[in-house]
Image: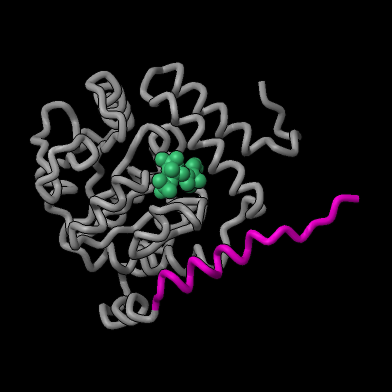
């Protein structure tokens, strides 16, 4: 039992969710390593949402509102950490959710599909009975996509993505947006918008932004997007990792 007074309580709660998901059998072996890497970056960031991350989130929401077929790509980690928040965000912004696993097995897909159903989201794409096709005609599991989802999407939000897959997506001509605590990852560098923040903070924050931006003028949304430069924003995110504390 975790005590709320523990200084690392929130981080330990997330770690516990990942351990449980792993035991439930829907995470790949490397999922814990990916989580640990994220944890380390978040520690250095002070486990807070930064200004550049907020800026990237406003732009993300604006792009998603203006998109015809925005899709949120989910894997085991994002499901374990933020399933309800992802469903709420998708419903608020009018996006689809698609299961997309780097190490896709029928068993994992079935378990994750079941979780979305249990959490009140039966329309989940990328399930075993969905029609799967290949982006850029690359016959490789990393390029697989649902025909009505990622394959035909104009905007894809891919939290915690792997660089190889991000590369395939970035060559597809779609808007690629990532949430990745590592501003130096290949995914962060390749995406059109990179949100350097923890997925558990970013998704609910974007739901709030969506409630606000949905009623705004299209012109304002377009200005937000045009004024944004991902490389500059990533550099600002990186600056915030400077360690200010001294060892006493
Ligand atoms: P790349 O291939 O893009 O260079 P990578 O090899 O690190 O990156 P993975 O290990 O597949 O790719 O992806 C995990 C990424 O997700 C890491 O960059 C990690 O920092 C990030 N990450 C892990 N947990 C979280 C989280 N909760 N929120 C946001 N990002 C996270």
Horizontal side, residue 95 vs residue 130: left or right: right
**Vertically, is 220 above or below 134?**
below
The image quarter in which residue 87 lies: top left
Kindly tell me whether residue 123 is visible in this rendering: no
The percent position of residue 230, horizontal first and vertical second, equals 41, 69
Q: Quadrant of residue 128?
A: top left
Q: Which residues are magenta?
A: 228-248
Q: Residue at x 48, y 37 (%)?
A: 34
Please tell me how many numbered marks the rendered image carries. 0
**x, y (%) of residue 194?**
41, 60
- The colour scheme used here is one colour
Q: Is residue 145 left or right of residue 32?
A: left
The structure residue drawn at horizontal position 26% and vertical position 65%, both measured from the top left corner, is 65
Check if residue 131 falls in the magenta segment.
no
| x then y, percent, for residue 195 | 45, 59
For image coordinates 57% across by 31% down, the residue present is 15
Residue 12 visible: yes
In which quadrant of the rendered image does the N terminus lie? Answer: top right
Q: Residue furthest right?
A: 248
Residue at image location 54% in from the left, 43% down from the top? 38
Q: Nearer the viewer, residue 53 or 169?
A: 169
Please tell me in which quadrant of the rendered image residue 117 appears. Answer: top left
Residue 148 place in picture, x, y as percent: 11, 46
Which of the pair 196/143 is nearer the observer?
143
Q: Within the magenta stretch, is there residue 245?
A: yes
Pick the front one: 33 or 24: 33
């Amino acid at each position: 039992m975790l005590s709320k007074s523990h200084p690392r309580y929130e981080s330990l709660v997330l770690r516990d969710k990942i351990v449980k998901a792993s035991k439930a059998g829907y995470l790949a072996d490397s999922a814990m390593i990916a989580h640990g890497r994220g944890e380390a970056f978040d520690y250095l960031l002070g486990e807070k949402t930064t200004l550049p991350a907020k800026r990237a989130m406003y732009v993300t929401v604006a792009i998603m509102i203006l998109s015809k077929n925005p899709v949120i790509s989910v894997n085991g980690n994002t499901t374990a950490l933020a399933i309800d928040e992802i469903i709420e965000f998708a419903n608020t912004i009018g996006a689809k959710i698609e299961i997309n696993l780097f190490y896709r097995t029928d068993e994992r897909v079935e378990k994750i599909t079941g979780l979305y159903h249990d959490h009140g989201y039966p329309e989940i794409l990328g399930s075993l009975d969905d029609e799967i096709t290949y982006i850029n005609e690359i016959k490789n599991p990393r390029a697989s996509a649902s025909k009505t989802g990622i394959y035909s999407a104009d905007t894809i939000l891919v939290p915690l993505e792997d660089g190889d897959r991000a590369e395939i997506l970035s060559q597809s001509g779609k808007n690629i947006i990532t949430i990745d605590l590592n501003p130096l990852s290949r995914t962060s560098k390749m995406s059109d918008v990179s949100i350097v923040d923890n997925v558990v903070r970013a998704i609910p924050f974007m739901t709030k932004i969506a409630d606000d931006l949905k009623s705004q003028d299209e012109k304002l949304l377009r200005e937000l997007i045009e004024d944004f430069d991902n490389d500059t924003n990533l550099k600002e995110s990186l600056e915030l990792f400077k360690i200010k504390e001294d060892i006493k």
